[in-house]
Image (cartoon, rainbow, N blue to C red):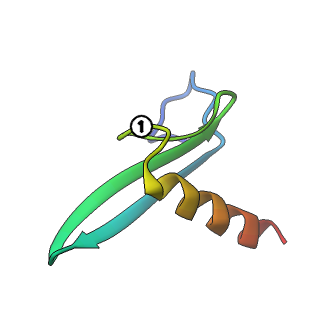
Amino acid sequence: MRKCGPGTSVRLLYRVIERVDGELINHLVFFDRHGWYCEHGRTCPAVGLARKRAERLAR
């Protein structure tokens, strides 16, 4: 939570590392009162990966 700041509503934060053609792309995926989103937008594929991971850990 400290990475997001004390006044935020962020409940979960995931860093997703994507490899495309040998290049690494970092994504920060957040879950807060607005739902799931990535720093690259709500439709970024990293959002789905983070959601699946969170669901697996919640079981």
* Image location of residue 18, percent across then percent down: 32, 68
**Horizontal side of residue 59 vs 30, given as left or right:** right
Compare residues 8 and 21 and report the one nearer the observer.
21
Taking 40 as reference, is 50 above or below it?
below
According to the picture, the residue beneath numbered tag 1 turns out to be 41
User: Can residue 33 be spotted in the picture?
Assistant: yes
Taking 40 as reference, is 6 above or below it?
above
**Horizontal side of residue 24 vs 49, given as left or right:** left
Quarter of image, res 23: bottom left
Taking 50 as reference, is 11 above or below it?
above
Residue at image point 15% right, 78% down: 22
Residue at image point 42% right, 58% down: 15
* Image location of residue 40, percent across then percent down: 35, 41
Q: How many marks?
A: 1
* Image location of residue 35, percent across then percent down: 66, 35
Residue at image point 60% right, 36% down: 10
Compare residues 26 and 49 and report the one nearer the observer.
49
**Horizontal side of residue 51 vs 58, given as left or right:** left
* Image location of residue 24, percent across then percent down: 21, 68
**Image quadrant occupied by the C terminus:** bottom right
* Residue that sits furthest to the top in the current view: 7
What is the three-letter code of the residue carrying label 1?
Answer: Gly
- What kind of element bears circle 1? loop
* Residue that sits furthest to the bottom in the current view: 22
Residue at image point 43% right, 48% down: 44
**Image quadrant occupied by the N terminus:** top right
User: Can residue 14 be spotted in the picture?
Assistant: no
Compare residues 13 and 50 and report the one nearer the observer.
50
* Residue that sits furthest to the right in the current view: 59
Taking 56 as reference, is 27 above or below it?
above
